[in-house]
Image (cartoon, rainbow, N blue to C red):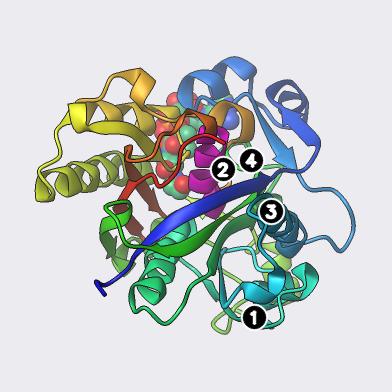
């Protein structure tokens, strides 16, 4: 038998109810709906409220919904991979916590830390397990509770981020659909422009780190913007050229949702009209590892079997990349 490909055979997402809109934010810090809309494209973001609720709380809901939607028993899942930079705690992994909450008992599970490219990294890893022929059902979750590392007194970062979780089921297929190709990259020299300094082994939590607000996201916005806008478009074009894909062959660009200007610039560089670019940043902001599966889930009913999708991301690390995916099923 030929080597299997890995196809996404189901997708589900979960977002918290609470909507923090630009008007409420502008009462918290010196900002405005106009500035955020024009510079970033966000109108509101979801925030997970409730003491003791972390990323696994949202991810379990996405995974349980995915299992129900695909009529899959938790016992059938063999691997669960969670992409996140906001784990519930250092260890055990958030993937382990999700598996426990979702009743997944026959799987091994682990986390991937690649910031905004986390879902792409995890999807490639999950697909590679399926392609070996040894695994039949793998779940990949992208989930982040960004509100837990956001400083709501810093107007340069607090409008950008939100909380969400989204999950896909990967299964083997023996036809020309599924994960077709990927280009994934990393450059640690970019780490200093977007990071969270304290709480790890180099700078463990202390009174000083708390006072210096070093448990919150630090970002040099303009520098990250310049790298993001070039690298995300470059890698999306590179995967098209590598696979001889023309703009008319592409059904949708599925971009990481960090800034509408970066998303639009990537679509333009690929030669795509705006209607072929998936966008939902206005509703959720940047949910880091969740953005790509979250937007894909919202567009699920528009997708047809065989549609060529280019998934592309850029984020902290720096990490970036693109995946060419052929959608595997028609709307149900
Ligand atoms: O997902 C991970 C990767 N991250 C990204 O891709 C994010 C990349 N960066 C960006 O998206 C943008 O750089 C930001 C949205 C973060 C900032 O937009 P910008 O157009 O680069 O703004 P800026 O930092 O150059 O600031 C322009 C002005 C400044 O004022 P002055 O110096 O011109 O007087 C800022 O102080 O806007 C001011 N500003 C604000 N004004 C109102 C910064 N934040 C705000 C704010 N409200 N929230």
**131 left or right of 95?**
left
Would you place residue 116 above or below residue 109 in this image?
Answer: above
Task: Give the residue furthest to the front.
Answer: 1
Real-space Cα distance between discs 1 and 3?
A: 32 Å
As helix, strand or loop, the secondary structure at mark 4 comes to: loop
Instruction: Decide which of tag 2 and tag 1 comes sooner along the chain.
Output: 1
Q: Which residue is mark 2?
A: 294
Query: Which quarter of the image is occupied by the N terminus?
Result: bottom left
Q: Which residue is mark 4?
A: 158
Q: Which residue is mark 1?
A: 204
As helix, strand or loop, the secondary structure at mark 2 comes to: helix
Instruction: Decide which of tag 3 and tag 2 comes sooner along the chain.
Output: 3
Label 1 crowd bin: few (<14), some (14–19), many (20+), radius 10 Å: few
Please provide the residue range marked out in magenta.
Answer: 288-300
As helix, strand or loop, the secondary structure at mark 3 comes to: helix
As helix, strand or loop, the secondary structure at mark 1 comes to: loop
> Can the viewer see residue 323?
yes
Mark 1 vs 4: CB contact within 8 A? no
The verdict on label 4 being within 8 Å of ligand 1 is: yes
Real-space Cα distance between discs 3 and 2?
A: 10 Å
Between residue 287 and residue 141, name the one nearer to us. Answer: 141
Instruction: Decide which of tag 1 and tag 4 comes sooner along the chain.
Output: 4
The answer to which quarter of the image holds residue 183 is bottom left
């Amino acid at each position: 038998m030929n080597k299997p490909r890995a196809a996404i055979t189901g997708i589900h997402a979960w977002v918290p109810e609470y909507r923090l809109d630009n008007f409420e934010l502008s009462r918290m810090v010196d900002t405005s709906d106009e500035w955020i809309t024009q510079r970033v494209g966000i109108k509101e973001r979801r925030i997970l409220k409730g003491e003791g609720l972390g990323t696994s709380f949202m991810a379990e809901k996405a995974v349980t919904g995915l299992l129900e939607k695909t009529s899959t028993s938790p016992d059938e899942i063999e691997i669960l991979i969670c992409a996140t930079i906001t784990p519930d705690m250092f260890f055990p992994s958030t993937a382990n916590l999700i598996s426990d909450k979702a009743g997944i008992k026959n799987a091994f599970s682990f986390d991937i830390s690649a910031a905004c490219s986390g879902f792409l990294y995890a999807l490639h890893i999950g697909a590679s397990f399926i392609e070996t022929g040894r695994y039949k059902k793998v779940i990949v979750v992208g989930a982040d509770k960004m509100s837990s590392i956001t400083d709501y007194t810093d107007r340069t970062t607090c409008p950008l981020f939100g909380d969400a979780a989204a999950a896909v089921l990967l299964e083997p297929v023996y036809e020309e659909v599924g994960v077709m190709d990927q280009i994934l990259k990393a450059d640690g020299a970019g780490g200093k422009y977007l990071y969270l300094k304290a709480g790890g082994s180099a700078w463990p939590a202390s009174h000083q780190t708390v006072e210096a607000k070093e448990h919150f996201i630090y970002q040099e916005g303009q520098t990250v913007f310049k790298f993001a806008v070039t690298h995300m478009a470059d890698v999306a074009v590179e995967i098209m050229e590598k696979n001889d894909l023309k703009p008319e062959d592409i059904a949708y660009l599925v971009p990481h949702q960090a800034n509408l200007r970066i998303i639009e610039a990537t679509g333009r560089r690929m030669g795509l009209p705006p209607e072929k670019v998936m966008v939902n940043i206005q509703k959720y902001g940047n949910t880091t590892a969740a953005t790509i599966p979250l937007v894909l889930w919202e567009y699920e009913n528009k997708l047809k079997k065989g549609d060529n999708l280019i998934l592309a991301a850029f984020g902290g690390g720096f990490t970036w990349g693109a995946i060419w995916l052929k959608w595997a099923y028609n709307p149900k």
